[in-house]
């Protein structure tokens, strides 16, 4: 373990922190202004917007905290980072009918996070 993160891990940490903050803001918006967002009809994964808001708020805090933990360079932080980024992708996929552009943007950020964490781990293990 290094005393601090470098390379792709720093890239993933920054993306996770800011992606987590965006998810927190998304959650606050869904909780506070649940009549602001228009929902498509007949969606298979319908929840009320307040429920989605709490899901995104909690997940956003987890993602942001994991992003901060990644700056230590610890392997456990990378593994948790991959897991919470995957959960973020799933949550945003289910959020698509509520706010499609935002959901697609956060899914893309989560994909980059997972790629960066896996690429950094591969490099650290000595594989090229």
Image (cartoon, grey):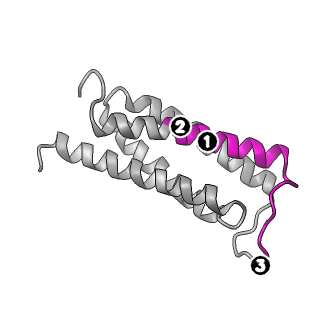
The answer to whether 5 is drawn above or below residue 57 in the figure is: above
Which image quadrant for residue 29?
top right
| Gap in angstroms between the C-alphas marked 3 and 2 | 32 Å
Secondary structure of the residue carrying tag 1 is helix
**Residue 79 position in % (x across, y down):** 36, 44
Q: Badge 2: few (under 14), some or many (20 or more) residues near its Cα, within 10 Å?
A: some
Residue reaching furthest to the right: 35
Q: Which disc is residue 22 wearing?
A: 1
The answer to whether 41 is drawn above or below residue 80 in the figure is: below
C-beta proximity under 8 Å, tags 1 and 2: yes
Which circle, 3 or 1, is nearer the viewer?
A: 1
| Gap in angstroms between the C-alphas marked 3 and 1 | 27 Å
Q: Which residues are magenta?
A: 17-41
Judge left or right: residue 68 versus residue 73.
Answer: right
Residue at the image point whose x is 69% and y is 46% from the top: 26
Kindly identify which residue carries mark 2.
18
**Residue 35 position in % (x across, y down):** 88, 55
Residue reaching furthest to the bottom: 42
Kindly identify which residue carries mark 3.
42
């Amino acid at each position: 373990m290094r005393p601090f993160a470098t390379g792709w891990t720093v890239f993933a940490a920054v993306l996770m922190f800011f992606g987590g903050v965006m998810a927190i803001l998304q959650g606050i918006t869904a909780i506070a202004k649940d009549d602001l967002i228009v929902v498509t009809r007949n969606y298979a994964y319908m929840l009320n917007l307040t429920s989605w808001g709490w899901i995104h708020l909690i997940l956003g805090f987890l993602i942001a905290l994991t992003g901060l933990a990644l700056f230590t360079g610890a392997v456990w932080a990378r593994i948790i980072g991959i897991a919470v980024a995957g959960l973020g992708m799933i949550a945003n996929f289910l959020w698509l009918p509520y706010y499609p552009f935002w959901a697609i943007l956060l899914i893309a950020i989560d994909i980059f996070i997972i790629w960066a964490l896996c690429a950094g781990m591969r490099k650290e293990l000595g594989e090229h």
